[in-house]
Amino acid sequence: MHELIIRGGTVVDGTGTPSRVADVAIDDGRITEVGRITEVGRLGARATRTIEADGLLVTPGWVDIHTHYDGQATWDPVLAPSSWHGVTTLVMGDCGVGFAPARPDRHDWLIGLMEGVEDIPGAALSEGVDTIKKGAVTFEAGEATGELPGRLLRGSR
């Protein structure tokens, strides 16, 4: 039995192959079967939950490689409107400014920098930095340029 089967959606898988109508089975957070999933399927056709997707697109989450969410991430855990459009992974800091990684004694300096660059009040940024530290965001997110200097400081590659 599958945990979830998405039935009859138009699958666009991002590989460049033509879209096709198919079922998608998901178990333990991973896609385990794509195609026409029937009772004789690899793991069986029953599911704890079924979503009928006839007439809808079924796609992997989108990756946004250039965002300006560095400030917004401090107060908006869903990073709208990107999440409304299927973005599940994003890269921040690719313009040379980002919050992470940073030593705690540099947070105020970075908040001041972001106030000028993005025109966001420092008080909003300051409160939000704690939200990010707690992991209260719904995205996979990484700092592009911010990660390299941190790795160099730690001596890793």
Image: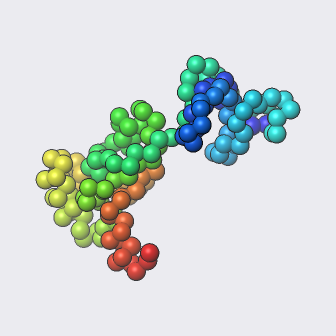
| Quadrant of the rendered image containing residue 130 | bottom left
Q: Residue furthest front?
A: 17
Q: Residue at x 21, y 61 (%)?
A: 110
Q: Residue furthest left?
A: 116
Q: Residue at x 25, y 60 (%)?
A: 96
Where is residue 68 drawn, in percent x and y? Answer: 28, 47
Left or right: 37, with 111 as reference point:
right
Indicate the quadrant containing the N terminus: top left, top right, bottom left or bottom right. Answer: top right
Question: Relative to 156, is 124 above or below?
Answer: above
- Res. 83 in view: yes
Q: Residue at x 65, y 26 (%)?
A: 21
Left or right: 74, with 110 as reference point:
right
Camera-side residue: 75 or 28? 28
- Res. 136 in view: no
Left or right: 133, with 68 as reference point:
right
| Quadrant of the rendered image containing residue 5 | top right
Q: Residue furthest top?
A: 55
Q: Residue furthest bottom?
A: 155
Q: How is the image coloured?
A: rainbow
Where is residue 20 drawn, in percent x and y? Answer: 63, 28
Q: Residue at x 19, y 55 (%)?
A: 114
Where is residue 149 drawn, in percent x and y? Answer: 32, 71
Question: Relative to 98, is 77 above or below?
Answer: above
Where is residue 87 drawn, in percent x and y? Answer: 44, 40
Camera-side residue: 95 or 5? 95
Left or right: 2, with 119 as reference point:
right
